[in-house]
Image (cartoon, grey):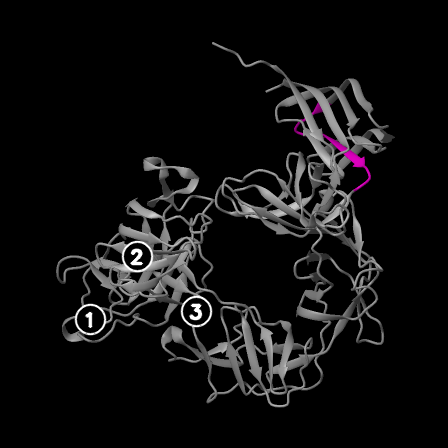
Amino acid sequence: MAIAPVNKFISIAVPVSPGENKLYEVPTGTSSLLLYAQVSNVGIGTYPTVSFIQRRKTRSTSLTRDIRVVKDIEIPPNDAVILIDGRLVLEKTPLIIDSLYITGIQTGVTTIDWVTYDEPSGIVTVTCAEKHSFSIGDQVTLAGIAFTCPDNTAGITTTIFPDPQKSYSIESIVEQSVGVSKTFTAIVGGAKGYKHVYNPAIHSFVRAKPGAVSFTNLSSGSKYNVTGASYRGVTGICTLTIPDHQMITDDGSTYTPTNATYNAITGVMRITLNSHPYVTGNLVKFDNESLPFKCAMDNNTNIKYYPRREKDQMSGRWKSVTKVDANNFDVNVGTSPFDYYAVSEAIYEPTSGICTCTIGRHNLVAGITSIRLAPESLGFTCTEGAGIKYYPRSSGTGANAGVPDKAYNTSVGITSVTDTTISLDVGTSSNTTVHTFATPIKLLPTNATYNPATGVMQLTTADPHLMETGDAVRIQDNTITFSCDYGGYIGIASHKSYPRSGKDPASDTWLVVTKVDSTNFSVNVGVSPDLSPHTFVAAVAGITRSVVKTGGAYAHDFDEATGAVVGSMLRSTNTIGIATEGIIFTCTMDNNQTEHAYPRASDPAHNTALAITEAYYNSISVNVGVSSAGGQVAPLQMEFMASILENSNA
């Protein structure tokens, strides 16, 4: 029997990029000896410096201690610095973790302002904040670029690129003029079909100075302590956590809207009030359950009052408005998209009319959330007639012929919930015998067409699919097989099954249905860069139909006859100020290794009254200015090389 070797020699050879670079961490169950390490200067006429660190982390506290092997040592042109020539012991125990880091300081470092990544070509187009001096063929290093992308389990994650560190060759320069262009391209390699979206540097709150926020509308200059903060460079919004601040004051008057419209897709509510005093940047707040609406969920039958306490985003919040004209202003009260659920089990009590459905993990609330059941989506058998009967129906049978079921095409209230079930009042039945749930059968497509330019796929079923426009389906991975010309393959080699896990946007996702006819429906599965004809080959039974639909993306109509509660709308003109360098963050541009204090004297939020965009009882949000910066690029000047002996102690 072969025995795995106890000792293993490994080599590390990586370029040194701007900022701090993590080189090595001792693997679990191993102690290591760093036998040799050096850094070479591969630039031309440059004098970079490096610092080499052993970082020891205490597991119980996460505190770290840096042991500097060398600090700021200069490397002459065409030369190298030997960092270790002997042995340095590194450990990973139940108490500590050892790692190696290197920090390089060099010339030519430029901040990255935007990155576009093309998959599957693997080409990145990098835009710098300033004009660069790169030429085609130059070797460069990239550092601290944040991308949002799907992970291997089809979730969404943010990764910092590149990892591990590499150098790249400049492929092209926009405008083809050195010292003029801010943009270049390089090939960094494909990502197995995963789409990557650039993020400006992600900021992490460290701490704040005492009294970092001031209330600028108070002559007393009241100061507030900040216990947390977040910042999104794309929007410029900084949200400050200030527990129970009681900072926002109204203007001393109350107002009553005379009309309102709501777009559940965009989240924008337009408020009508003739000759209102609101200007763009003012704050508005509504009393809970003060705005009456009817909606298409129950065919505009019942009046519902918003915002609902502890349910709607606008409940208890102040939000900034945008003035439309003298009689109207807009406020974003939050979107209300549809959510869909399948039912894996159902128990129906015909005497009480309660149907308890197993839908998996959910956040629906009894007595507050209403749902809608897809027509003829729940199958049961009973003693009345043979076969499976599907509910809710547009028409009953026998004495109830022509009468729709209570839960048909209307909102259904939730009477109780567990973590994975909801109980619904769907109406009683004259047949009080046992109703046995019929396990749903996945749909089997018999044909499919796909338009890669629009992303629309039309599916055909042998039997009626029973769905209406606005229902949804989930297509199991590898359900539908097409052939296409991508990659030049022919025959069976051209067959590809979709959706692919972690690659296609339709994977593990509810897709909204457009009904074509009783046996055909279409969904948008996403566009494809391959515009060649896609020919249906085969399919398996892998399409799950939605049964439960929640959310408020229905048409909403303000009920003028009822009208808003008198005096239920408030206005505030408050602003705040943030002390110079009062909020301290780290960011992904240097892997969160250094602290930066904001606002700086050069920042737009410095020494100014900031309009509040949103306020809650323990938080204030303000726009401090957008930032697209998110990484660094530099000419390749240093390369690190090391030899390590790993000894397994497992």
Residue 157 in sight here: no
Q: Amino acid at mark 3?
A: Gly
Front label number (3 vs 1):
1
Q: Residues within 10 Å of mark 1 (few under 14, many from 20)?
A: some
Mark 2 to mark 1 CA distance (whole Å): 20 Å
As drawn, which residue projects farthest toward the front?
176
Q: Residues within 10 Å of mark 3 (few under 14, many from 20)?
A: few
x then y, percent, for residue 585: 75, 52
Residue position marked by numbered label 2 in the rendering: 346
Q: Earlier in the sequence, mark 2 or mark 3?
A: 2
Q: Residue at x 72, y 68 (%)?
A: 245
Q: Amino acid at mark 1?
A: Gly
Q: Earlier in the sequence, mark 2 or mark 1?
A: 2
- Circle 3: element type: loop
x then y, percent, for residue 481: 33, 44
Q: Amino acid at mark 2?
A: Ala
Total marks placed: 3
Residue toward you, 423 or 211: 211
Front label number (2 vs 1):
1
Q: Is residue 354 above or below residue 555?
A: above
Task: Determine which of the numbered discs, if any, sits on residue 367 in the image.
Answer: 3
- Circle 2: element type: strand
Residue position marked by numbered label 1 in the rendering: 396
Q: Residue at x 74, y 75 (%)?
A: 574
x then y, percent, for residue 491: 32, 37
x then y, percent, for residue 46: 84, 33
Mark 2 to mark 3 CA distance (whole Å): 20 Å
Instruction: Give the left or right position of residue 131, taking residue 287 as reference.
Output: right
**Does the magenta run of residues contain 95?**
yes
